[in-house]
Amino acid sequence: MKRDQIQTNDRQLACALIQSQEGQDYLKGMYAAANYAWVNRSSMTFLARQVSGEINSLVNNQRTLFFRPLLDALIRHPMISTCI
């Protein structure tokens, strides 16, 4: 920050120009973090869809009448219903 004559009010804050090597390294790290988050979200959605498909097949199976209220509640759950 001294090299670029940048001053902050708090000594714990840090900043760098985007065109600097530090700024480019920071952006690369942020891109990697965003990619990791996207892959994590995609894999969680995939797994939730698999589970909801299994629940739907159980609901349609007549041998599971005893568990039907629980399965119906799971299908109406916001997390499951958004993935179907």
Image: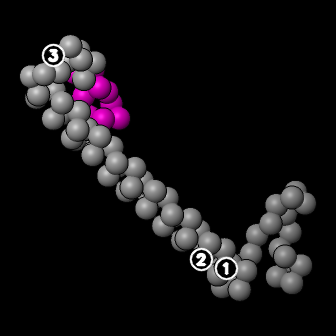
- Position of 64 with respect to 83 (left or right) is left
Q: Secondary structure at mark 2?
A: helix
The kind of residue on which mark 2 rests is Lys
What's drawn in magenta, residue-wise?
72-82
Distance in Å between CA atoms under marks 3 and 2? 53 Å
Badge 2 is on which residue?
Answer: 28
Corner quadrant of residue 31 = bottom right
Q: Position of residue 33 (x, y in %)?
A: 56, 65
Q: Earlier in the sequence, mark 3 or mark 2?
A: 2
Q: Secondary structure at mark 3?
A: helix
- Position of 12 with respect to 84 (left or right) is right
Q: Secondary structure at mark 1?
A: helix
Badge 1 is on which residue?
Answer: 25
Distance in Å between CA atoms under marks 2 and 1? 5 Å
Q: Position of residue 26 (x, y in %)?
A: 66, 74
Badge 3 is on which residue?
Answer: 65
Disc 3 packing (10 Å; few <14; some 14–19; many ≥20): few
Q: Position of residue 36 (x, y in %)?
A: 51, 63
Residue 77 falls inside the magenta stretch? yes
- Is residue 33 or residue 1 the one in the foreground? 33
- Is residue 73 or residue 6 the one in the foreground? 73
In the rendered view, tell whether residue 68 sits above or below residue 1.
Answer: above
In the rendered view, tell whether residue 19 sits above or below residue 58.
Answer: below
Q: Position of residue 4 (x, y in %)?
A: 82, 82
| Residue located at (48% from left, 67% from top) | 35
